[in-house]
């Protein structure tokens, strides 16, 4: 693993992307820490959520229910619903990275929006691994340190929105999606998935829209495979992984 | 149950949702259809994450300065700006629009 490790942690487009995302996300950790303590959780409960749960949406959902005086059971339910998408990310990441043994247990903990996004959009196996591990480790360290800072010092970044941090997150995910939109088919799928997400967001519980988007992706893949079988076309750039990265870890 | 129990239970279940995806047999994942779907999955999930992060507000949707961030990021991407510039453009647009009084 020595050589792997050397190649893993070095500067590269995926590494830079991961570090930029980790910086934006970590600042949100300050808000999480402060809001969590304000909601009535103790410092150590707050630290436990960031260290052990480590999936931001679920953590905010959990403290959101506690803040409003809701039953802890419904805090648990909301957090779990928001975490289900990580199962889908994990399946994708297993196909790309196939971590084994102890690394699998660590990879599981680092499986979140940011690592899935940074890793799965890379073209080569080395960049996929680098994207995953560097983003994951940087986000984990940054998020947990920021949580403690926020929980102890309070919300000195009173409004992350005033700094445009929410805009940074939007831009980051668009920046990751963009290189994939090389032909009409991925564009159509992206617009469809985004539209469906926005339309159902007000009517279903948080966490469900992204599961629906995943279902759309499965349906789209099945239908396009079927169409291709009847009218074989040589290539569909954009939606297929390159042969090199699809096979290298099998 | 105490709050501590619920915190730890929620953490354990969140970890389980992550781990279970890695326990899918590798042989299932080598099917060509799975390769194709993992391509469509990346596009659909990222598009959904963009939409969620742009419009989500509690349980509903909200149109605010984040739309400006989306537009600024798209403009930066059209100009082939590097990733970090795209992210900063998004942050600057959202912060700037809020300075001008937008929600």
Image (cartoon, rainbow, N blue to C red):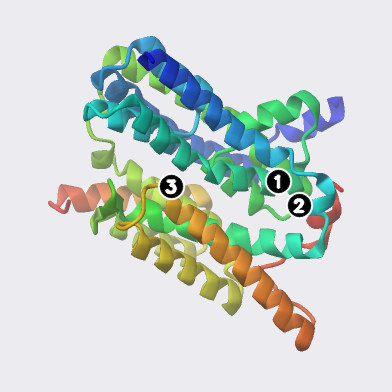
Up the image or down, A229 lies above or below A41; here it is below
- Label 2 CA crowd tier, 10 Å (few <14, some 14–19, many 20+): some
Q: CA distance from mark 1 to mark 3?
A: 25 Å
Q: Is residue B70 left or right of residue A186?
A: left
Q: Please give the label number shown on residue B47.
A: none
Residue A185 in percent (x, y) is at 59, 76
| Quadrant of the image containing the N terminus of chain A | top right
Q: Position of residue A21 (x, y in %)?
A: 49, 40
- Is residue A83 in sight in this rendering? yes
Q: Nearer the viewer, residue A17 or A77?
A: A77
Circles 2 and 3 on the same subunit:
yes
Residue A186's place in the image compared with A27, above or below, is below
Q: Which chain is home to disc 3?
A: A
Q: Which residue is mark 2?
A: A124
Residue at image position (30%, 60%) is: B67
The chain that hosts pointer 2 is A
Any mark on residue A207, and which? 3
Q: Which label's residue is closer to the chain start, 2 or 3?
A: 2
Q: Residue at x 80, y 82 (%)?
A: A234
Q: Nearer the viewer, residue A193 or A173?
A: A193
């Amino acid at each position: 693993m020595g050589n792997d490790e050397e190649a893993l942690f070095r500067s590269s487009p995926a590494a830079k992307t991961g570090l930029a995302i980790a910086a934006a996300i970590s600042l949100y950790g300050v808000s999480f820490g402060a809001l969590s303590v304000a909601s009535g959780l103790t410092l150590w409960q707050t630290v436990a959520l960031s260290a052990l749960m480590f999936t931001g949406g679920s953590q905010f959902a959990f403290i959101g229910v506690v803040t409003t005086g809701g039953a802890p059971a419904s805090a648990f339910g909301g957090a779990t619903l928001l975490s289900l998408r990580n199962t889908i990310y994990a399946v994708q990441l297993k196909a790309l990275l196939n971590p084994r043994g102890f690394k699998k247990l660590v990879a599981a903990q680092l499986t979140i929006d940011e690592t899935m996004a940074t890793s799965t959009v890379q073209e080569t196996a080395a960049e996929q691994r680098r994207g995953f591990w560097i983003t994951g480790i940087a986000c984990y360290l940054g998020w947990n340190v920021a949580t403690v800072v926020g929980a102890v010092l309070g919300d000195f970044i009173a409004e992350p929105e005033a700094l445009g941090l929410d805009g940074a997150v939007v831009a980051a995910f668009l920046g990751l999606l963009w290189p994939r939109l090389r032909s009409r088919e991925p564009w159509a799928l992206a617009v469809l998935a985004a539209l469906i997400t926005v339309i159902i967001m007000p009517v279903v519980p948080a966490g469900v829209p992204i599961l629906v988007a995943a279902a759309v992706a499965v349906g789209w893949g099945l239908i396009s495979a079927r169409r291709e079988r009847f009218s074989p076309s040589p290539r569909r750039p954009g939606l297929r992984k390159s042969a090199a990265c699809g096979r290298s870890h099998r | 149950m105490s709050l501590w129990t619920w915190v730890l239970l929620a953490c354990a279940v969140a970890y389980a949702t992550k781990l279970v995806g890695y326990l899918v047999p590798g042989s299932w994942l080598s099917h060509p259809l799975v390769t194709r779907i993992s391509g469509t999955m990346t596009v659909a999930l990222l598009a959904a994450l963009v939409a969620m992060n742009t419009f989500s507000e509690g349980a509903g949707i909200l149109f605010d300065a984040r739309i400006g961030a989306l537009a600024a990021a798209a403009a930066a991407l059209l100009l082939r700006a590097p990733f970090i510039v795209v992210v900063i453009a998004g942050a600057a647009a959202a912060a700037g629009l809020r300075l001008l009084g937008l929600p």
